[in-house]
Image (spheres, rainbow, N blue to C red):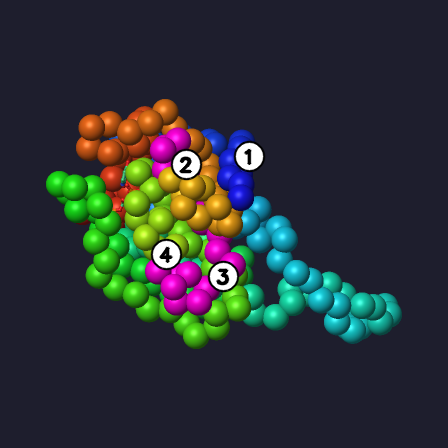
Amino acid sequence: MAHYIIDHPLVQHKLSIMRNKDTSTIKFRELLQEISMLMGYEITRDLPLTYEDITTPLMPMRAPMIAGKKVVVVPILRAGMGMVDGLTKLIPSARIGHIGLYRDEETCKPVFYYYKMPACRERLVILTDPMLATGGSACDAIDRLKKDGFKHIKLMCLVASPQGVEAVQQQHPDVDIYLASIDDGLNDKNYILPGLGDAGDRIFGTK
Ligand code: PRP
Ligand code: URA
């Protein structure tokens, strides 16, 4: 379908601080949460509304409310976890699923190790992962969700390579992608350039 770049100055400024190799783990995590909230505002723009009767201190009115409990936030472990809190601050009723995937260091192909989703297949899935490099992990995660019956999926990443965006759009044209940046490309180890390094390690302080 489409990809959307969230080019709001606040998002771009915070992303630049995250890219800096001297930014601490604490700051990196904090900024990712803030950006996720800002991106969440855009990604939820088309959530359906319903109207409920309420009474203000002055008079009754028909007031717009989000229609039902509509969202499942699904991080791709580990790095996708860093985007969950920002989204659930915006959508407290969201359920949370988990997909465990890591990229094999030699082949760069994704390896599955965990899958747990709430039952409600009709909900919108917001799949989170800060990095969309070759696109292998995101494509496999979406495959798995679709095989399990989820139909309405949006992918939220921070930084992508052009190849990653292309791969998801080819294999899953029905999935909209939300991004803060499409970078220049990939290095010989399939890391995004200029990118921000290994997102999981920077969020969890594992290197
Ligand atoms: C990173 C990242 C994505 C994947 C992107 O995860 O968070 O899941 O690589 O690469 P791809 O588009 O080429 O598949 P990683 O395998 O480092 O695992 P981690 O989050 O547990 O550190
Ligand atoms: N995974 C990351 O964390 N960073 C990259 O640049 C590519 C894959």
Residue 61 versus residue 71: which sits nearer the camera? 71
- Image quadrant in which the C terminus is located: top left
Q: Neighbour class for label 1 at 10 Å: few (<14), some, many (≥20)?
A: few
User: In the rendered image, is residue 159 in sight?
Assistant: no
Which region is colored magenta? 143-165
Q: Which residue is mark 1?
A: 8
Would you say residue 154 sits in the magenta stretch? yes
CB under 8 Å between discs 4 and 3 = no
Q: Position of residue 165 (x, y in %)?
A: 41, 37
Q: Earlier in the sequence, mark 2 or mark 3?
A: 3
Quarter of the figure with residue 162: top left
Q: Which residue is mark 4?
A: 143
What kind of element bears circle 2? Answer: helix
Disc 3 or disc 1, which is closer to the eye? 3
What kind of element bears circle 1? Answer: loop
Q: Position of residue 119 (x, y in %)?
A: 43, 74
What separation in Å lies between label 2 and label 4 (alpha carbons)?
16 Å
Count the marks: how many? 4
Residue at image position (48%, 69%) is: 121
What separation in Å lies between label 2 and label 1 (alpha carbons)?
23 Å
Residue at image position (49%, 61%) is: 151
Residue type at the position of mark 4: Asp
What separation in Å lies between label 2 and label 3 (alpha carbons)?
20 Å
Q: Earlier in the sequence, mark 2 or mark 4?
A: 4
Residue type at the position of mark 2: Glu
Residue at image position (33%, 27%) is: 185
Q: Earlier in the sequence, mark 2 or mark 1?
A: 1
Q: Neighbour class for label 3 at 10 Å: few (<14), some, many (≥20)?
A: some
Q: Which residue is mark 2?
A: 166
Left or right relative to 193: residue 156: right
Q: Earlier in the sequence, mark 4 or mark 3?
A: 4
Can you tell which mark lies on residue 151?
A: 3
